[in-house]
């Protein structure tokens, strides 16, 4: 059933070109707002019953918070600009949380030079090479050349084989699974570059922030902003086809609701999904879209009576741990947001066909909570007050060698049809700041192709 939010008469009265945005995540919402501000009559078509995509909130126990873990870095200039535009910049709370490392069955703090030098799993030479690798990567401005070097080879050469096998490879495997061997060095560079952006800008240690109320508040404010701009929103409206209209323009066919014709359309779904619904593309365009190999996520939200410890992120190198990291939001977010409790995310990054997607919640809970018992002395299952699992099969594509060479153009061969998604974030990491930058780039591309 389609839920429509359609106060778009003002935009229609201006005689603006009609544009459909397929997908109501952060990319789709930001792009729709920009198009509407430029006088277009915009319709967002979203399959889910709510806006937000990966940033959407949900109820966990007795409160509502983000379905996946999100923070804003102080250096995330595009996010901060959006918050300011929405009148939320004064509601951001900033902190400098600590980072932990779980290896060899023990928890280690990794904050500052002294703790780094004391890090037991590596000897002094290993630590110097590891530190040198991070420093060297943080100073690289153009990562194009890194796309032609495998990340494993690059890290092994710079940090040494012991550090590669002890630290880097487990972390790569946690994020990319067995396909980490296919990734380029630009992948690790992008992560380091984002975390070191504050230092490059003279801000010192990176600060982490959140909006009081979480992304539920941000998306709610964004939805109101879209209504004010006259954007029509169709929810619960899965799109089956986007392609050339019989009488010109671009047709968008919605399951159970027929076809509507627009002057232009922007599809913001994952590349493989775009390949399935976009009609009229050339064989080369379809091949580029279908060639992207996505990594998915199974992410548990766990409500606890107390935080697990002082760390926001705990990196994990132990292969027996069934999740990729521990993200304790209570180290960043005031616990009053969680009704006095603590909120922990346990993400597991897996390929779209991984059996974990079919595992029932109680099986995942038993496995994940059992691992927490082994990791944290004194932890018991009785501390778990709520447990909920999110599953998304396509989150971000593996950044393979020469990735840029295979990125499909945003403007397709079908007049008025554009495709933009996480596959177009080249040499970056999937986060809201990068997504907003992509929305700007997509807008410029659409304008350069004279969408009317």
Image: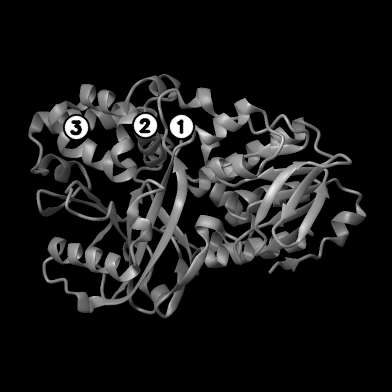
Q: Is residue 70 visible?
A: no
Q: Residue at x 41, y 58 (%)?
A: 69
Mark 2 element type: helix
Identify the mark nearer the N-term, 1 or 2: 2
Tell me residue 17's x, y (percent). Answer: 85, 45
Q: Are marks 2 and 3 in contact (CB under 8 Å)?
A: no
Residue count near mark 2 (Cα–Cα under 10 Å), binned few <14, some 14–19, many ≥20: many
User: Real-space Cα distance between discs 3 and 1?
Assistant: 21 Å
User: Real-space Cα distance between discs 2 and 3?
Assistant: 15 Å
Is residue 437 left or right of 169 when viewed as pictured? right
The part of the image, by quadrant, that contains residue 334 is bottom left
* Quarter the C terminus occupies: top right
Is residue 341 left or right of 278 when viewed as pictured? left
The numbered disc on residue 427 is 1
Tell me residue 332's x, y (percent). Answer: 36, 61
Q: Residue at x 38, y 57 (%)?
A: 357
Tell me residue 217's x, y (percent). Answer: 56, 67
Return the residue at label 2.
189
The part of the image, by quadrant, that contains residue 93 is bottom left
Q: Residue at x 64, y 59 (%)?
A: 86
Q: Is residue 259 above or below residue 361?
A: above
Between 237 and 246, the one lying in front of the other is 246
User: Real-space Cα distance between discs 1 and 2?
Assistant: 8 Å
Q: Is residue 21 visible?
A: yes
The numbered disc on residue 190 is none
Q: Nearer the viewer, mark 2 or mark 3?
A: 3
Between 352 and 326, the one lying in front of the other is 352
Is residue 169 left or right of 15 when viewed as pictured? left
Residue count near mark 1 (Cα–Cα under 10 Å), binned few <14, some 14–19, many ≥20: many
The numbered disc on residue 164 is 3
Residue count near mark 3 (Cα–Cα under 10 Å), binned few <14, some 14–19, many ≥20: many
Identify the mark nearer the N-term, 3 or 1: 3
């Amino acid at each position: 059933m389609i839920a429509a939010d359609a106060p778009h008469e003002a935009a229609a009265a201006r005689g603006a070109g009609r544009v459909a945005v397929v997908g109501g995540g952060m990319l789709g919402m930001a792009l729709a707002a920009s198009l509407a501000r430029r006088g277009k009559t915009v319709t967002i078509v979203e399959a889910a019953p709510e806006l937000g995509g990966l940033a959407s909130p949900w109820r966990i126990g007795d409160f509502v918070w983000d379905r996946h873990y999100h923070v804003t870095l102080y250096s995330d200039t595009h996010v901060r600009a959006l918050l300011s535009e929405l009148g939320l910049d004064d509601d951001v709370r900033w902190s400098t949380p600590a980072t932990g490392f779980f290896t060899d069955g023990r928890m280690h703090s990794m904050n500052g030079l002294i703790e780094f030098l004391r890090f037991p799993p590596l000897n002094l030479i290993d630590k110097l090479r590891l530190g040198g690798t991070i420093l060297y990567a943080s100073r690289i401005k153009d990562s194009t050349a890194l796309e032609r070097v495998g990340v494993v080879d690059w890290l092994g050469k710079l940090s040494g084989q012991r550090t590669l096998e002890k630290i880097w490879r487990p972390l790569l495997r946690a994020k990319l699974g067995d396909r980490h061997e296919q990734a380029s060095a630009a992948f690790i560079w992008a992560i380091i570059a984002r975390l070191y952006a504050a230092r490059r800008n003279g801000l010192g240690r990176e600060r982490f922030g959140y909006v009081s109320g979480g992304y539920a508040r941000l998306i709610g404010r964004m939805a109101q902003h879209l209504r004010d701009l006259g954007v029509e929103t169709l929810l619960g409206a899965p799109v089956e086809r986007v392609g050339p209209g019989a009488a010109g323009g671009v047709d968008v066919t919605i399951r159970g609701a027929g076809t509507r014709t627009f002057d232009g359309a922007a599809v913001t779904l994952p590349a493989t999904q775009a390949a399935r619904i976009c009609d009229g593309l050339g064989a080369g365009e379809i091949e580029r879209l279908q060639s992207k190999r996505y990594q998915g996520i199974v992410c548990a939200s766990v409500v606890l009576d107390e935080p697990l410890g002082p760390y926001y992120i705990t990196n994990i190198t132990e292969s027996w741990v069934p999740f990729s990291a521990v993200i304790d939001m209570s180290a960043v977010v005031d616990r009053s947001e969680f009704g006095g409790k603590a909120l922990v995310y346990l993400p597991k990054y897996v390929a779209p066909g991984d059996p974990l997607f079919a595992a029932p919640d109680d099986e995942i809970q038993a496995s994940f909570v059992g691992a927490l018992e082994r990791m944290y002395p004194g932890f018991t299952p009785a501390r778990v007050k709520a447990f909920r699992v999110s599953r998304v099969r396509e989150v971000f594509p593996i950044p393979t060698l020469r990735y840029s060479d295979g990125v499909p153009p945003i403007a397709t061969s079908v007049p008025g049809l554009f495709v933009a998604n996480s596959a177009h974030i080249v040499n970056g990491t999937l986060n809201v700041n990068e997504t907003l930058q992509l929305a700007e780039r997509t807008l410029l591309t659409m304008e350069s192709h004279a969408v009317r």
